[in-house]
Image (cartoon, helix red, strand yellow):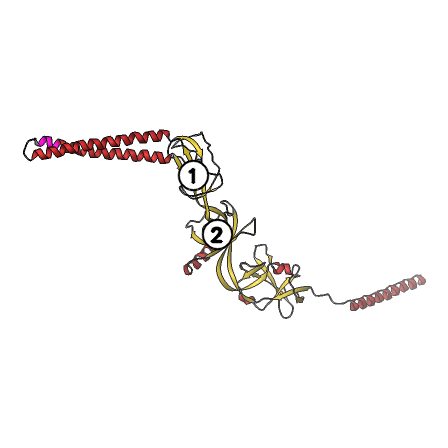
Amino acid sequence: MKAKTILFMLLIVSALVAYILYGKRQNQSTQQMPPAAKPQVEVITLNTTKTPRKIVLNGRVVAFQSSQVRPQVSGIIEAKLFTEGALVEKGQPLYQLDDARFEANLSSVQAQLESARAQHLTVKQREKRLQALSQSQAVSQQDLDDVKASLAQAVAQISVAQSVVELAELDMEYSQIKAPISGRISQSLFTAGALVTANQAQHLAIITQLDPVYVDLQASNDMLRQIQKELLTKKVLPVQLNDHISDSVSQTGEISFADVNVDSSTGAVTIRAIFANPSGYLLPGLFVTAEVNLGEIDAVLIPQRATSRTPNGDLMIWLVDDQGIVSSQIVFAHGSEDNQWVVGDLSLSGQSLIVTGYHRLQNGVEVQASHWQSSSTEKQ
């Protein structure tokens, strides 16, 4: 019994000695472990600069003028006088109708006009004779009144015949269908031998004027107010246009007018700009992007790669103070310029902005900052 007690006491002492030795080793290893490394970030110093203030709007090209070519008289098409897809001038003959019937009708009404003139001459000579006889009271007053009435009727018949001749001449002229406006003509929907009528529903072709052209842009109510504010002080507000197919199209136009109605479904307002289009590259229906230049403002440029979005969609950046402590901040961008956000908060000037390494940071964390060098592609 005494031996068991001694053995039990030895086991307790051994366990105690082992626990003390283990604790010393842990303390030594903890003292030898280096402190946790600070997160590495790259920063730039923000500065105030003069920056163009632009609004980017989307829109579509609209023809300056578009006219459907239609017949004004009925007849058979004898010939098509234009090349499909070519430029035509206002008044240029496009179709020739069979004009034999119009020519015959014109000859007939011209003969009626000559007859009316001859009748007028006869009545006028008779009226002169009766006027002379009336001086000697050789004719009655009734005969004189009758011849005067006949003369007035003859004059009216000449006017009627003249109007009929003018209508016949118009029909003769309309037998040659001419371009109502200048522009580029579409394909012809009728060929030689086809019968066309003055009241037909189908047009013969369409002429579209492409120089200049309109561009209808969609702007929010806030953007419209900014544009209207600039138009109060400027006669012309330049608009830079770029399409989405080729970089070769880069033109400057000006705003023509802004619609007075807001689309209830989209909340957008249509702003129409006018652009020269001598090459005809801008075709109706083409989707384009336009930049409205609102002048220069003092702003801070923030690289887009240094920003992120909050769940609410706000633009967020990370700043570093002199002690290396980071903090996040929400900013509002007026627009973009060369892969940089244009921010009007001038209080950011002189502060250090984290460009890389901010994705896992939290407010109040201390970081190790170094200067960020942008690549050539990012500078472009």
Task: Give above or below for 349 relative to 149.
Answer: below
Rendered-image quadrant of the C terminus:
bottom right
Task: Give above or below for 201 relative to 353.
Answer: above
Viewer-side label of 1, 2: 1
Give the residue at x 74% y 67%: 35
Give the residue at x 88% y 65%: 13
Q: Which residues are magenta?
A: 141-145
Give the residue at x 64% y 67%: 325
State the residue position of label 1: 68
Residue 119 appears in the figure: yes
Instruction: Assign a secondary structure to mark 2.
Output: strand
In the depicted view, which residue is nearer to us: 299 or 73? 73
Q: Residue furthest left?
A: 136
Residue 267 appears in the figure: no
Q: Amino acid at mark 1?
A: Gln
Marks 1/2 in contact by CB < 8 Å: the verdict is: no
The percent position of residue 33, horizontal first and vertical second, equals 78, 67
Q: Quadrant of residue 224?
A: bottom left
State the residue position of label 2: 219
In the depicted view, which residue is nearer to us: 74 or 3? 74
The percent position of residue 114, horizontal first and vertical second, equals 25, 32
- The secondary structure making up most of the magenta span is helix
Q: Is residue 350 left or right of residue 126?
A: right
Question: How far is mark 1 from mark 2, CA to CA?
Answer: 31 Å
In the depicted view, which residue is nearer to us: 116 or 214? 116
